[in-house]
Image: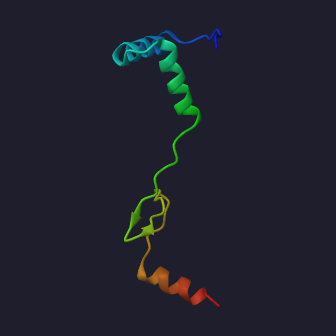
Amino acid sequence: MRTTLAIDDDVLAAAKELAATQRKSVGEVISALARRALCPAEPSRKTRNGVPLLPVTPRTPRVTSELVRRLNEELP
């Protein structure tokens, strides 16, 4: 499909470089990049000993024996 797009000069230059390296057309390279950006791959779930690991952020509290004990006491 043909269409006209306004692409920044630096982006076009990078796409042309990739196209030359991959021996593809600029259109093919830009289509592949756009497709990848629009349909990101599902993040792979990390596991340890078969148990899925949850993502850790800077605000994630540290799991301690005391925390586990308190949470255990809250169970009915």
Name the quarter where the C terminus is drawn: bottom right
Label count reads 0
Which residue is at the front of the view, 13 or 74?
13
Against 71, residue 33 (above or below) is: above
Which residue is at the front of the view, 68 or 27?
27
Question: Where does the image place residue 18, in percent across and percent down from the top left?
Answer: 39, 18
Q: Taking 18 as reference, is 60 left or right?
A: right
Question: Where does the image place residue 10, in percent across and percent down from the top left?
Answer: 46, 13
Against 46, residue 30 (above or below) is: above
At 49% from the left and 86% from the top, the residue drawn is 69
Which residue is at the front of the view, 53 or 56?
53
Question: Where does the image place residue 23, in percent across and percent down from the top left?
Answer: 37, 15
Name the quarter where the N terminus is drawn: top right
At 50% from the left and 18% from the top, the residue drawn is 28
At 56% from the left and 29% from the top, the residue drawn is 35
Image quadrant in which you'd find residue 21? top left
Against 38, residue 12 (above or below) is: above
Against 63, residue 60 (above or below) is: above
Which residue is at the front of the view, 50 or 6?
50
At 53% from the left and 12% from the top, the residue drawn is 8
Residue at the limit of the structure toward the left, as seen here: 21
Colour approach in the figure: rainbow
